[in-house]
Amino acid sequence: MSTTIDQAFVKQFEREVHEAYQRMGSKLRHTVRVVNQVNGSVAVFQKVGKGTAATKATHAMVPVMNLDHSALEVALQDYYAGDWVDHLDELKVNIDERQVIANAGAYALGRKSDELIIDALTTAPAGQEIADANTGMTLAKIMDALSLLGDADVPDDGQRYAAVGWKQWSEMLSLPEFASADFVGPENLPFQAQMQAKFWLGTYWVPHSGLPVDGNDIRSCFWYHKSAIGHAIGSDVVTDITWHGDRAAHFVSNMMSQGAVLIEDTGVVEIKCDETPD
């Protein structure tokens, strides 16, 4: 046997973990503002206020907008997900144990990425909230949230996203305005091969199982603009595989360094929905 076979195993495993993370790990990473390859333990996101246009007299100086600039810092945290792959166990099972471990690590890191983003979303101010009103997701709540985004001049540029729980997703499927071809056209129906996202009201709606729910079964859903949340990545998913002869097994360690922060308060609306069982 070639003495480099172990390196081939390592390289293949690293590729499988990275691909799995990109494919099915995080559902929200692409919906927020991302800065990659951060050096150091803190990332900085720049926030720029609104500008105001004004007139000027002939030959006069062009008026200055005096934009308000501020910097928001987010600390990067290190996260790990590891497990053992016993050499002889791989011979006794009818599944690819390496791929199982790769997918499990990718899922774990992906959930952590989404958890960081959701934690940042929950820091939006109370004024950006639609009360639960003892009801689930309704068209009235959606319209109220849309009004909040519009009143705040949140850009309607195709970069709005909404993360809702699966209960709310199922409730939205009963809304003709959301699920009927008479309203949205056949190209935007949610009943496609994979119900992972739908474009409606200038927004990509994404069902997500990790949104916070309190002790009263009130689920928090979020409608936001991509620029409202910053996601900093010091180290993307990295896999280290080490052979331990005393255990006759490989130890697979997946790791990453990331953080998230709320950048624009008015760019996020929280929609609370009652999930109390009938």
Image (cartoon, helix red, strand yellow):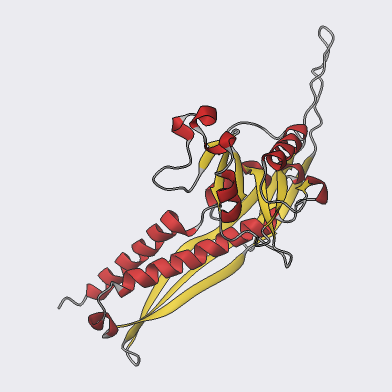
Q: Is residue 109 left or right of residue 226?
A: left
Q: Residue at x 66, y 52 (%)?
A: 221
Query: Where is 143 relative to 32, above or below?
Result: above
Q: Residue at position x 52%, y 72% from top? A: 80
Q: Quadrant of residue 20?
A: bottom left
Residue 73 in sight: yes
Q: Name the image quarter holding the C terminus.
A: bottom right
For the N terminus, the quadrant is: bottom left
- Indicate the quadrant where residue 90 lies: bottom left
Coordinates of residue 263 in the picture (x, y in percent): 71, 48
User: Can you say whether 273 is above or below 99 in the image?
Assistant: above
Q: Residue at x 49, y 73 (%)?
A: 81
Residue 155 point in image, percent of width and height: 67, 32
Residue 38: in sight, yes or no? Answer: no
**In the foreground, 164 or 268:** 164
Which one is nearer the viewer's eye here, 274 or 76?
A: 274
* Residue pictured at 79% horizontal, 18% vertical: 62
Residue 115, position as x, y percentages in the image: 61, 61
